[in-house]
Image (cartoon, helix red, strand yellow):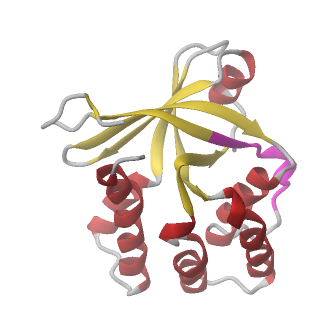
Amino acid sequence: MIPEEFINYAFDERVKMIRKMLSGNMSDEILIGFTRHNAAIITCGQAGINGSIKGVGFIHKDKYIQETLEKMREELKSEYSMFRAGKFLLEEIYVRNKIDFEKIISLELARKHTWHNLMSGEKRATILFFTPPSKSYEVRCDVEIHIDDDVWEYANSLHDIFHRPEKPRDWKRTPAYLFKIREIYDNSEDRMGVRIY
């Protein structure tokens, strides 16, 4: 099982941050909290050794995906507001018992170095989280690329629910990555690379 200390860092603290944001408390603490969303994806392949900051998050367990996708489709038809989007995330997405903590998703918005590495080489990556002043986790994963399926729709929907574009995006240009966690290391200054999973 994925250790609670990592779930608390990557999930529970993120939920607390969204609640604070919705309460109107846009302090520096919230900006630092976003480091749990913006991780470095490290790959190696045709484009060389590469690190790229990408938005990441957990996905629902397979048995909840269809139900969640239906709710996401409806939400994307609604009028956008940051408050409404945050409320939807808390009520429908960040539901602890529905989350598959062994899987992390992200979108490929640039299709550059990370994309070329994962398309041409071994489908492995490391997700590096760092939250100042000293909290860090290294998450080693096997990677799947998803296009035009449920994982792809989930990742694109989740992105657009919160970051609603003024004009609809062409989702065919943004594949999804599914990172299946193999190992987790606590790289914080007090642990220095202790394997916790």
Residue placed most toward the observer, 54 or 3: 3
- Residue 159 location in percent, x, y? 66, 61
> Of residues 56 and 82, which is closer to you in this image?
56
- Can residue 149 be seen at all in this image of the molecule? yes
Q: Please state if 61 lies on the left or on the right of 95 as rendered.
A: right
Q: Could you tell me if residue 108 is visible in this image?
A: no
Q: Is residue 61 magenta?
A: no
Where residue 114 appears, x then y in whole percent? Answer: 63, 28
Location of residue 89 with respect to 114 vertically, above or below: below
* Quadrant into which the C terminus falls: top left
Q: How many marks?
A: 0
**Looking at the picture, how far across and down is residue 140, in whole percent?**
47, 30
Identify whether 167 is placed above or below 126.
Answer: below
Of residue 137 and residue 25, the one placed in the foreground of this image is 137
Q: Quadrant of residue 73?
A: bottom right
Is 174 included in the stretch rendered in magenta?
yes
**Whole-percent x, y for residue 131 in the image:** 29, 49
Q: Is residue 63 above or below residue 83?
A: above
Q: Quadrant of residue 165?
A: bottom right
Q: For the view shown, which residue lies furthest in the left direction?
A: 190
> Relative to residue 107, is residue 82 drawn left or right?
left
* Residue at image coords 40%, 79%: 19
Question: At x 57% / y 17%, what residue is drawn?
Answer: 44
For image coordinates 58% across by 38% down, the residue present is 180
Residue for point 35% across, 73% down: 16
The stretch in magenta equals 169-178
